[in-house]
Amino acid sequence: MIETKGTNIEGALQAALEQVKQTTSPTLVSITEQINKVDILSFFHAGKKLVKNRSFWSNADRDILFIGVGNAYTIKATENSYDVTKAEWNNLMKRTIINNPYKNAYTGPIAIGGFPFDEANDSYDLWQGFEGSQFRIPQYMLSVDNEEYYLTVNTWIEQNSDIEKIANILNEESNILLHSAFKPSEKNQLLLKYEVDPDEWKQLVRKVTDYIDSSTVNKVVLARELQVELLHPCNITDVLKQLLRRQQNSYVFAWETDGACFIGASPERLVQVEDDQLLSTCLAGTAPRGKTMEEDNQISQSLLQDEKNREEHQIVVNMIRDSVLSYARQVRIPDQPVIYPLQNMQHLFTPVRAELMFGYTLLDVVKKLHPTPALSGFPQKESLAFIREHETLERGWYGAPIGWFDHKFNGEFAVAIRSGLIREEKASLFAGCGIVKESDPDLEYEETKIKFTPMLEALGG
Ligand SMILES: C=C(O[C@@H]1C=C(C(=O)O)C=C[C@H]1O)C(=O)O
Ligand SMILES: [Mg+2]
């Protein structure tokens, strides 16, 4: 990687051009500048005017945030996607000229995107545009690290590029993004809700419990779909606004492509890597929130002691521990879960900390972990086979790793649950739950109902 120092976009591009003179192929240049505070939703909303695909990511603490507009480059893979992505990113970064005076981990060239739930699935009726795994380096990326704001511009140049012209366009479009205002005039209004085959779904839960009784499988995660229709084409900025406002302790993400947007607020971290420090999370076992503080505490206490939910949870802890042990040392896991409170429900939560061993990266760990028993079941192979055979839903990117990484593979992935795929005035929302031996179809159905509420509320329902 080559590092330069420049003061503005044109200066940085001129400096880069000097280095590009010896090469014959186009070179990616990534330029970062610290900027004044801007309104994040206005930046996101203005991206639509530029008619470019947008990406959004915020961590659960809301102190790290990325908004991408446009694609400078996309890495796509339909097979071996983890290895292909890693190799292609390494290759690209070797050739990229990075102009970033801030030694800050959340600036510079960053890839944002996701993997499919099941790489073996190749039907994309509902998920058209989301084929395979896709990671984009946005053309414009706003990053917010605590209260500091940065704009990174990524663009291609070659020997005979007209730098002045490129810089003018980049400056002009950056200005549109930084100086537009989002007026929440258009609130989304929910018109219709349609649950896809609830009775069949309950029968399938029964089938899983029978299967568990008669096999070595002890958990299968079943998902279902809720289709909704809005009065007007969806205003994605408003959905983001609602998710950010209501869904505490949740990652908020959005990824647009081909006129569709996959969006959600997930409480579930898959894994975060910063230098060699790894943090993963086991999240499984669910109960509603109480209406009073007293009732809420009571529900938390029973959830912590409930055998069925503890089993669901422990299966996830065991698998994540074993997977992390292959790539990391000094694995630290508390022996009891704690409560993870959300707006509409509460979960059992166990953090997993470890030190990543030399030679492995975030993407290796993501590949090893996904799908955890929180989204497929246990054992992985058998539960996945059951889902492939019996679940009628196209999971696409639902329940799959979604996140970001930088040029050193620092980054974070969440599990894309509490989410929906929106296309104009139509949306499909997804929710699943872990079926174990003691599962009751009606109760599991109620559990998925609660899991739809974050997205339903955000859509004006
Ligand atoms: C599958 C989902 O959630 C998962 C299932 C849970 C459960 O069954 O208790 C809890 C959290 C998640 O691991 C979903 O929200 O769609
Ligand atoms: Mg459950």
Image: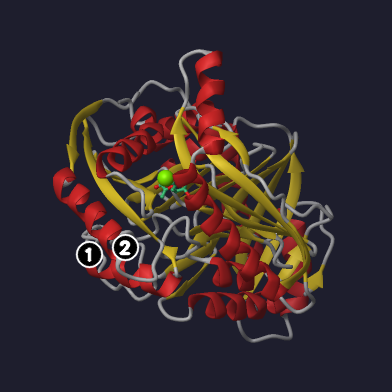
Picture coordinates of residue 442, whole percent (x, y): 25, 39
Say which quarter of the image contains residue 441. top left
Q: Secondary structure at mark 2?
A: helix
Q: Crowding near pointer 1: few (<14 within 10 Å), some, many (20+)?
A: some
- Residue 205 versus residue 327 in the image, above or below: above
Give how far apart the Cα atoms at labels 1 and 2 are: 17 Å
Disc 2 under 8 Å from ligand 2? The reply is: no
Q: Quadrant of the N terminus?
A: bottom right
**Residue 78 placement: quadrant:** bottom left
Residue 406: give x, y in percent of width and height. Answer: 68, 62
Above-or-below relation of 125 to 94? above
Q: Which residue is mark 1?
A: 390
Residue 416 vs residue 306, the one in the foreground = 306
For marks 1 and 2 on the same chain, the one whose residue lies earlier in the sequence: 2
> On the image, numbered disc 2 is attached to which residue?
213
168 relative position to 241: left or right: right
Residue 183 percent location from the top left of the image: 45, 22
Residue at screen point 48% across, 29% down: 241
Residue drawn at (42%, 30%), measured in percent from left and top?
238
Q: Residues within 10 Å of mark 2 (few under 14, many from 20)?
A: some
Mark 1: which amino acid?
His
Residue at coordinates 55% horizontally, 29% vertically from top-left?
Answer: 300
Residue 359 versus residue 62 in the image, above or below: below
Number of numbered labels in the structure image: 2
Q: Quadrant of residue 305?
A: top right
Using the image, tell me which numbered label, if any, was put on residue 76: none
